[in-house]
């Protein structure tokens, strides 16, 4: 694009005055302006000289270039260096950006779901602990039976509200069953059977 080429030609001497080092100079001489898009000034480094792009990505160099471009254009500018010197290379880079964003969002969604699942069952786990701590005369079987009944209802209610049954959810569910079984001094499989029956899963 002639327009960005003209802009780059105007600011390049000022940029060179503000930097030092053979590598930065080589990168500035090698790179080519590609486009100005959404306040992003994009330059590319030829594929065969891609190792030079790192010099332009250094925070101090990038900041100097952005300030110089902002002064020239009268607006805030973000400077971006890519590998390749054509618009097709920039389009490919944008597709890569979009894919990274999609994967990051997918990862964050999964992480939030995992944290929410863990949080819900952690609350149940702590609730069982509090209920057990409040039991008087824990050695008496009738008191443990009352606690067991309350504990089963707590877990069943959480189970019925569960919408995701992946491995993580099932492990957290099992953890609460084990806690109730331990406190009630009952086999965990028996406790699990009672909970699943009341939850309508058996």
Image: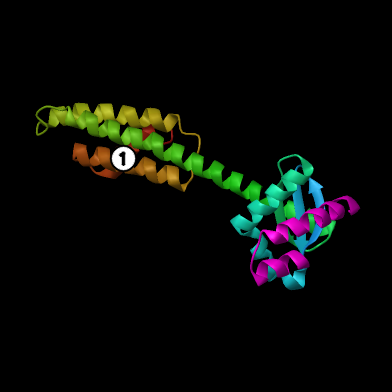
In the rendered image, the vertical position of residue 200 relative to residue 190, given as above or below = above
Q: Is residue 171 within the magenta segment? A: no
Q: Is residue 12 within the magenta segment? A: yes
**In front of the other: 27 or 19:** 19
**Badge 1 local density, few (<14 within 10 Å), some, or many (20+)?**
many
Q: Is residue 201 visible?
A: yes
Give the number of marks: 1
For the rendered model, the colour scheme is rainbow
The image quadrant that residue 61 belongs to is bottom right
Residue that appears at 20% across and 38% down:
183
Judge from the rendering whether residue 39 lies leftward or rightward of residue 22; answer left or right.
right
Label 1: which residue?
177
In the rendered image, the vertical position of residue 176 relative to residue 149, given as above or below = below
Judge from the rendering whether residue 136 lies leftward or rightward of residue 17; answer left or right.
left
Say which element carries label 1: helix
Q: Residues in magenta?
A: 1-30
Judge from the rendering whether residue 49 lies leftward or rightward of residue 124; answer left or right.
right
Residue that appears at 77% across and 67% down:
29
**In front of the other: 31 or 150:** 31
Q: Main secondary structure of the magenta part?
A: helix
Q: Position of residue 54 (x, y in %)?
A: 64, 64
Judge from the rendering whether residue 159 lies leftward or rightward of residue 67; answer left or right.
left
**In front of the other: 186 or 175:** 175
Q: Is residue 165 visible?
A: no
Q: Position of residue 43 (x, y in %)?
A: 77, 57
**In front of the other: 22 or 50:** 22
Residue that appears at 64% across and 69% down:
21
Q: Position of residue 70 (x, y in %)?
A: 73, 44
The image quadrant that residue 26 belongs to is bottom right
Give the farthest residue toward the right. 2
Q: Position of residue 148 (x, y in %)?
A: 23, 31
Residue that appears at 38% across and 27% down:
157
């Amino acid at each position: 694009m002639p327009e960005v080429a003209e802009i780059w030609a105007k600011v390049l001497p000022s940029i060179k005055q503000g930097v030092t080092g053979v590598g930065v100079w080589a990168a500035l001489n090698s790179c080519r302006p590609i486009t100005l898009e959404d306040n992003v000034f994009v330059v590319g480094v030829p594929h065969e000289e891609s190792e030079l792009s790192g010099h332009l990505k250094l925070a101090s160099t990038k900041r100097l270039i952005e300030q110089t471009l902002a002064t020239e254009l009268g607006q805030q500018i973000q400077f971006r260096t890519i590998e390749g010197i054509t618009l097709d290379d920039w389009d490919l880079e944008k597709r890569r950006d979009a894919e990274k964003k999609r994967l990051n969002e997918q990862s964050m969604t999964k992480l939030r779901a995992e944290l929410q699942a863990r949080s819900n069952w952690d609350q149940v786990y702590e609730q069982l602990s509090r209920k057990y701590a409040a039991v008087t005369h824990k050695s008496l079987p009738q008191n443990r039976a009352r606690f067991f009944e309350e504990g089963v209802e707590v877990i069943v209610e959480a189970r019925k509200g569960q919408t995701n049954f992946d491995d993580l959810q099932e492990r957290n569910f099992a953890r609460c069953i084990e806690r109730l079984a331990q406190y009630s001094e009952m086999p965990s499989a028996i406790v699990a059977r009672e909970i699943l029956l009341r939850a309508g899963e058996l």
